[in-house]
Amino acid sequence: MPTLCRPIAEGGGGFDYRLAMAIPDVWIKLLKEKSDEDWQVGDISWTLVNRRWSEKNIAYSESHDQALVGDKTIAHWLFDSQIYSHMSVLSERTPIVERGLALHKMIRLLTYALGGEGWLNFEGNEFGHPEWLDFPRAGNNDSYHYARRLFYLSDDETLRYKYLNAWDQAMNACEEQYKWLSAKNTFISRQHEGDKVLVFERGDHGLLFIFNFHTHKSFPDYRIGCTRCGKYKVVLNSDSKTYDGLGRVSDTQVFLTEDTKWDERPFSFKVYTPCRSVLVLALTGDVK
């Protein structure tokens, strides 16, 4: 309904938020139908920001329907059968697992950071729950066996689910500190299809998101434009070993801006952006 979130006085439904239902459809379509090399960062970002001004949206990367029996969550699409065989920290870190860990973190944060003014998660999906959900019905002999979420999996120190859960906690903590969901000043400065790099600013604390979706190219000395000058620190790093990344960027690194205009921004600086990773930077000493 186009008027669902307009005031009743205008003939609308009077709701405060609407669900951004197009977003999970896009992610599943990409995972099902396109190779990673064919992902278009411009198309992805357009879907995430395509909403009416002043009409708040609830962003979500996957719906509860995908967790039900007969469908597949993002984690299932990414890890496939290895979600059952290779999620132990003692198991081989296969290319499928490495890709799955990286993209699971990136998809969720990009949706969270750019897709709306609220964030929705279906319980268990935050750590890549390996089982579907199935409520009692005639087709399963009224069984309650799969009417459950196995939260102990994310607490098990021997399983990689703990890293995805830690990333989810870190995202929420970062939003709580910098409050990007309530910000109205989002600016996408870079959508480079060849590099598969997406860069945008959101919020009042110089928050800068740098996504590199390239399958194998990492970029040293990659120039990033920004609105405000000063020192930028790392506040989220999907490649950190804390989240089972490869540790290619130091979490303690600080970036100093230069008076060089770039991507329609008055200042810029250079970063190392590893493939299949996201860095979130913030101005130091800017949070009140």
Image (cartoon, grey):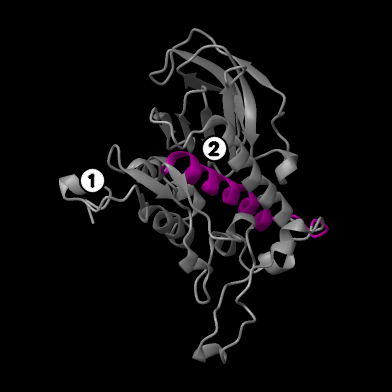
Report how far apart the C-alphas of labels 2 and 1 lie in the structure: 39 Å
Q: Which residues are magenta?
A: 89-116
* Residue to which mark 1 is pinned: 7
The answer to which quarter of the image holds residue 222 is top right
Left or right: residue 130 versus residue 29 is right
Amino acid found under the numbered disc labelled 1: Pro
Q: Nearer the viewer, mark 2 or mark 1?
A: 1
Q: Position of residue 14 (x, y in %)?
A: 27, 50
Q: How many marks are shown on the rendered structure?
A: 2
Residue 239 seen from this side: yes
Dot 1 falls on a residue whose secondary structure is: loop
Q: Quadrant of the C terminus?
A: top right
Q: Position of residue 67 (x, y in %)?
A: 53, 68
Question: Which residue is at 46% across, 37% downward?
Answer: 181
Amino acid found under the numbered disc labelled 2: Asn
- Of 140 and 71, the residue lying toward us: 140
- Using a 10 Å C-alpha cutoff, classify the residue at mark 2 as few (fewer than 14 neighbours), some (14 to 19) or many (20 or more): many
* Chain-order first, disc 2 or disc 1: 1
Residue farthest to the top, as pictured: 259
